[in-house]
Image (spheres, coloured by chain):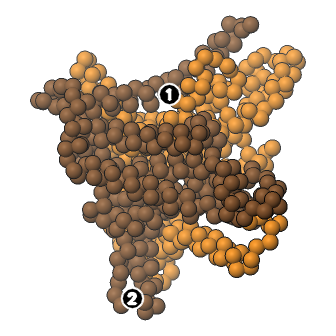
Chain colours: A brown, B orange
Amino acid sequence: MKSDASKLGFYLLLAPILLWLIVLIILPHIGLFMVSISEKVGPREFETGFGNYAAFFGEPLYWRTFARTAIMSILATALTLILGFPIAYYIAKLTRGRTKTTLFLMCMIPFWVSELVRTFGWMILLRETGVISTTLQRLGLVSGPVELLYNDAAIMVGLVYTSILFMVVPLVTTLDSLDDSLIEAGYDLGGTSSSIMREIVIPHAMPGIVSGCIVVFMLSLGNYLTPILLGGKDSLWFTGMIYTQFITRFNWELGSALGFLLLALSSAIVFLGLKLSKQSLSNTMGRT
Amino acid sequence: MIPTVPRPAFAKWCYRAYVTVFFIYLALPLTVVCIFAFNNSVFPSPPWEGFTVAWFFGTEAPFIGVFHERPILRAIGTSTFVALWVSGLAVAVGTCNAFLFVRHEFKGKALLYMLMLLPLIIPGVILGISILVFSSTIANTLEDATGLWFDGLRPGLILVILGQFSFITTFATLVISARLQKFDPSLEEAALNLGATQLGAIRQITLPFLMPAILASAIVSVLMSFENFNTTLMLVGSDSPLTITMFDKLKQGSTPVLNAVSLLLIVISAVLGLFSLFFPKSKR
């Protein structure tokens, strides 16, 4: 039994979310797709077709950059997981009380600071006249200035740095909920450290691992600042290409097609990650 | 690998060393940014030339401090304006969404919830270009049809606000929903029994209970808006927010003014962030 007043309330609550999702998310993406399948045949004249996608596959520069971006993002995600897991385990299982809160906060603070500031910090550290190069010279380990910036390793350092918090935080949350007695029971039953890790800790942490990996992959794939500022002249990144098509070349049709491909790739990886680990989007993302 | 199970001292020591190195890695970039804000040199790099606060308060070229650098001050103003709008909108819509998802059962709820989470998995650049393309298409159509100008739909602050709002609302919704779920509905029923109207009960009982979450998500929204780069980059017009201004300056070559701005940003965001974490707990 629903009164008219509560029905009215329901529709009033439904209006803003529908407005938000339809006007700002769904329609723009449909629009993006429509633009991506239109080809310019003359001034203000367009034809429907997949020419822009053909251009992507026909031009090695485009799809190589696409593949490069994807591979480097996967690498960054794997690296972040490997580096972040021991830290999350340490915070969740080996510290208590105040130490735990402090360590957790120390992980959080860089995340609140703008990505631009973090990248700027790495530039000061890594460049030819930077802190690390100067320190190495001072110590007599190298004879002249060394350029550590503008290469793929620098991009990787920056990507891992930018996204590691998004890996550590969900991992700490899931590992925290694992009862120590389960690990003790594993040892009592004769398990070794590695078998306990494999059969108790990692399966329990799976939701955290999946949500961490998805977020980190997404952030790396869609990153613009880090590859542009830390990467060299030939380290292209797909978002940079989209930016060029949109803002510099003013070729919105091709830009939309490239954007749509990036979106398709990131959705596919998210979907695959969820399927492989048998998690749902609401389960993994809705718990932040 | 838990405290109650003994481990060899060497392994323990290695583990601690790794954790220490990790935290040094985390702190290093921010520390150097802060330190070089006080270096008496025109480049933010070694050698150390002596301590100065000229990059904050200086008035003579080349030592023009943040507080006298017009473009940066204007950009801070723009960012604040955008952040307040985004935060206000996101919290308002987020609160409505929380009530919708926690209090109502309806057809298609699971689907709507999933759609609500979508902005989290759409890369910021794509969110930006899709809104750019869509609003420009509308503007073109309207201008062709009416012959008037629709500058609000062209890249500019309105689009920046909408673009940031489009994904920050998801965070606000999640934070406020989590708090609303902990609310005991019998408190509201008691108020209704005592003669309160439905809206009165929500205003006097439920909203005060939600206040910590609302404030926390407002602060987080301000932070996220302030530091957003990807979505903003695609939608920005002639008034650029702070991150875009800093990016342009950084591409031209860095000066310690950027370090000074960064230091201010670090301090402000750390304070706001800590506040957003501790405020909900202390009010409980």
Around disc 1, counting alpha carbons within 10 Å, would you say few (fewer than 14), some (14 to 19), or many (20 or more)?
Answer: some
Classify residue B37 as left or right of residue A242.
right
Around disc 2, counting alpha carbons within 10 Å, would you say few (fewer than 14), some (14 to 19), or many (20 or more)?
Answer: few
Tell me which residue sits at (15%, 26%) in the image.
A45
Q: Which residue is mark 2?
A: A142
- What is the quadrant of the C terminus of chain A in the image? top right
Q: Residue furthest left?
A: A42
At label 2, the amino acid type is: Val
Q: Position of residue B120 (x, y in %)?
A: 51, 40
Visible residue check, residue A30: yes
Dot 1 and dot 2 residues touching (CB under 8 Å): no
Tell me which residue sits at (40%, 63%) in the image.
A155
Quadrant of the rendered structure where residue B24 is? bottom right
Q: Residue furthest bottom?
A: A140
Q: Position of residue B204 (x, y in %)?
A: 78, 27
Q: Which residue is mark 1?
A: A20
Chain of the residue under label 2: A
